[in-house]
């Protein structure tokens, strides 16, 4: 029975792995998302019923729920060298000349690959299973980020046995470049902008920042990807880099298809020129071309100098910049009242689009770069997405130009501006400012919050101007004005009915989405989830003290103070009551049993569990009527301590809370 079940599980896992490979590596799926989800749910169900059969390489175990305190260091078996850069044809010819001098005139082939703008990663496999993923670091020592890299669907957790056998490999190392696609980058920054969080400058920074997050669940949501380019195996005889790329593909790794075997340096230069022109057509960022001597024996003879190999070089593309005229500096107002400068530019084509506006960030940045109206400026697309002013061309400045000054009054409502001590931002202090009203409603309705389809920025602008919306609470009374709305030009009955249906559907959104939608300063989607997990009703949150809010993991003083201030405002409480009456969810959906063996008991999980993921353990606790908390207190009944348990275990021992291990927890669960 057990052997039959094990065979069924392994067969199901292999089927899911194959579909992952076809979808995330080949971009050639052969089943629908629905069919794929059914396979995963089937596997999850079997594993939940048989936790002793769960293995770390199962497709269900990609995303762990353990939050690390820090990353451990990792020493690379072979140093991860950096490449020397070249910037011109002449420098490429010099590289070719040096290679041939050392090889005494031998014929040399080169492999040219796109230089992905991401971060280098080492993947170590033993018996075909991923055991370690580490960053490059200083080339010798990096950081172990295995739990985060496991969440990347294009990274295989296990190589199929038949592939290992065919190529005679078992233990090996693969290196590659982890990156974030332009689409994932846009979505991430869009969400951060709506949450008024600092934007990432480019996809590389966002990928690097993401891989350093301490919570794998957050990493899994950000759409990281990988292209691999290096193989070092235990028994496979490879003679060229070209062969190693073929092997990587055959083992199921994702290799960038845009590489070429070049017979001469002239072909290399042709490839570089070709992709400098075509780079904008790619869905990810590249910043150059990597050139490698193809023959491994020649690579060995060429050796390395300092931290760079003599047998490889990087050709760096020229930055994507353009020169244009800055006509005026305007000031725009965000939903929290922040007033920021924007450059209104002479339209110029750059990196695939026409740019007419660019962010100037804040007044301090404006002063530092001495940017003035009428200046000729160099603009650049941050990550080829966000236009920004890089510098001023001083030689083109008019003699009569004057430094920019911030407005003393709000450019939208005329209210006095306020600059808090220690901050660079100016604020409009009028909460009824139309720009803030519109901003708050846009944030409330956007897909990361209440996700009200059809209620976009243009329609919100119109409804505010027509006095249908004075706050986001008014959204839920639009149904009373249906007859008036359908008479508005270009709207009509069908579009209004669709909008009203979407508004009604938004009432099903969970408590954490509602809290995020309220637009409380510093409370992003992640913070809202953590807070509602701890305070499962709005009434509990309203009664919570600053210290109690800060006891939630990763919730600091700025967030707690902002929450206290928000709910201390009478107008905000009025909006809250309107939203409650409208039927929005202000309590976490109860999934716990009213009876159950854990009824009234509070558990805290810490460390790494081997039989269950933390999420599975929490679900089992809740299903049995218990509560899974994120912090230890005197009210905690049990602390379940896995491997590498940290400060929560120390606190439990100090408070005298009962500590049990995973085996004892499972016995308690199954008793």
Image (spheres, rainbow, N blue to C red):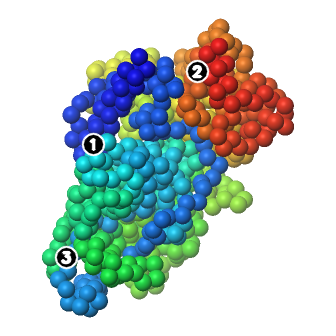
Q: Position of residue 657 (x, y in %)?
A: 80, 29
Residue labelled with disc 3 = 109
Quadrant where the C terminus is found in the figure? top right
Residue at (61, 16) in percent of width and height:
670
Residue labelled with disc 1 = 162
Q: Is residue 304 above or below residue 459?
A: below
Quadrant where the N terminus is found in the figure? top left
Give the SS element for disc 2.
helix
The answer to which of 16 and 452 lies nearer the viewer is 16
Residue labelled with disc 2 = 620
Q: Is residue 295 above or below residue 93?
A: above
Residue 176 seen in the current view: no
> CA–CA distance between discs 1 and 2?
37 Å
Q: Nearer the viewer, mark 3 or mark 1?
A: 1
The answer to which of 309 and 435 lies nearer the viewer is 309
> CA–CA distance between discs 3 and 1?
32 Å
Direction from residue 65 to residue 542 in the image, left or right: right
Residue at (28, 37) in percent of width and height:
18
Direction from residue 608 to residue 315 in the image, left or right: left
Q: Position of residue 354 (x, y in %)?
A: 28, 61
Residue at (44, 33) in percent of width and height:
60
Q: Is residue 156 above or below residue 365?
A: above
Q: Which mark is residue 266?
A: none
State which tag comes first along the sequence, 3 or 2.
3
> CA–CA distance between discs 3 and 2?
59 Å
């Amino acid at each position: 029975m057990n052997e039959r079940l094990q065979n069924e599980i392994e067969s199901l896992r292999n089927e899911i792995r194959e579909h992952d490979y076809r979808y995330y590596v080949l971009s050639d799926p052969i089943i629908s998302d629905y069919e794929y989800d059914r396979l995963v749910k089937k596997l999850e169900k079997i594993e939940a019923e048989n936790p002793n059969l769960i293995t770390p390489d199962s497709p269900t175990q990609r995303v762990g729920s353990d939050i690390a305190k820090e990353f451990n260091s990792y020493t690379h078996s072979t140093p991860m060298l950096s490449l020397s850069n070249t910037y011109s044809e002449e420098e490429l010819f010099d590289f070719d000349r040096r290679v041939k001098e050392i090889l005494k005139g031998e014929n040399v082939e080169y492999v040219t690959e796109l230089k992905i703008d991401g971060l280098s990663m080492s993947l170590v496999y033993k018996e075909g299973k991923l055991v370690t993923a580490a960053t490059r670091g200083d080339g010798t020592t990096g950081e172990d980020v295995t739990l985060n890299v496991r969440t990347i669907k294009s990274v295989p957790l296990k190589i199929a046995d038949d592939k290992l056998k065919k190529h005679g490999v078992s233990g090996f190392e693969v290196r590659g470049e982890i990156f974030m696609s332009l689409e994932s980058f846009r979505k991430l920054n869009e969400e951060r902008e709506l949450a008024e969080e600092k934007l990432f400058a480019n996809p590389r920074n966002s990928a690097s920042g993401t891989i350093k997050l301490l919570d794998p669940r957050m990493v899994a949501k950000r759409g990281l990807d990988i292209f691999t380019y290096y193989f070092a195996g235990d028994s496979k005889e490879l003679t060229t880099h070209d062969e190693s790329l073929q092997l990587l593909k055959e083992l199921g790794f994702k290799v960038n298809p845009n590489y070429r075997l070049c017979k001469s340096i002239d072909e290399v230069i042709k490839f570089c020129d070709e992709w400098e022109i075509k780079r904008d057509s790619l869905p990810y960022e590249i910043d150059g071309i990597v050139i490698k001597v193809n023959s491994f024996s020649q690579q060995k003879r060429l050796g390395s100098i300092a931290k760079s190999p003599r047998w490889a070089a990087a050709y760096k593309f020229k930055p994507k910049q353009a020169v244009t005229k800055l006509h005026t500096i305007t000031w725009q107002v965000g939903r929290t009242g922040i007033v920021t400068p924007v450059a209104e530019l002479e339209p110029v084509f750059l990196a695939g689009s026409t740019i007419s506006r660019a962010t100037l960030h804040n007044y301090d940045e404006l002063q530092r770069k001495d940017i003035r109206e009428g200046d000729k400026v160099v603009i650049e697309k941050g990550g080829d997405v966000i236009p920004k002013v890089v510098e001023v061309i001083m030689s083109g400045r008019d003699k009569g130009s004057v430094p920019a000054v911030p407005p003393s009054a709000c450019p939208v409502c005329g209210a006095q501006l306020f600059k808090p001590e220690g901050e660079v931002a100016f604020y409009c202090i009028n909460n009824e400012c139309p720009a803030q009203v519109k901003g708050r409603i846009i944030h409330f309705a956007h897909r990361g919050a209440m996700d009200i389809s059809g209620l976009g920025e243009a329609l919100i602008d119109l409804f505010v101007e027509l006095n249908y919306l004075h706050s986001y609470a008014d959204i839920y009374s639009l149904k009373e004005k249906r007859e008036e709305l359908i008479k508005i030009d270009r709207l009509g009955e069908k579009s209004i009915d669709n909008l009203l249906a979407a508004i009604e559907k938004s009432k099903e959104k969970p408590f954490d989405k509602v809290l995020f939608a309220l637009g409380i300063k510093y409370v992003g989607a992640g913070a809202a989830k953590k807070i509602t997990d701890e305070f499962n009703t709005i009434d509990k949150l309203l009664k919570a003290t600053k210290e109690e809010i800060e006891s939630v993991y990763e919730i600091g003083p700025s967030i707690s103070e902002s929450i206290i201030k928000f709910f201390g405002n009478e107008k905000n409480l009025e909006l809250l009551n309107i939203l409650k009456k409208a039927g929005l969810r202000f309590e976490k959906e109860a999934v716990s049993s009213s009876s159950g063996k854990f009824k009234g008991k509070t558990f805290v999980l810490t460390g790494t569990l081997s039989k269950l993921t933390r999420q599975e353990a929490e679900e089992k606790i809740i299903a049995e009527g218990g509560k899974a908390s994120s912090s230890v207190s005197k009210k905690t009944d049990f602390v379940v301590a896995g491997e590498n348990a940290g400060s929560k275990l120390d606190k439990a021992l100090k408070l005298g809370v009962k500590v049990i291990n995973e085996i004892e927890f499972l016995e308690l669960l199954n008793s």
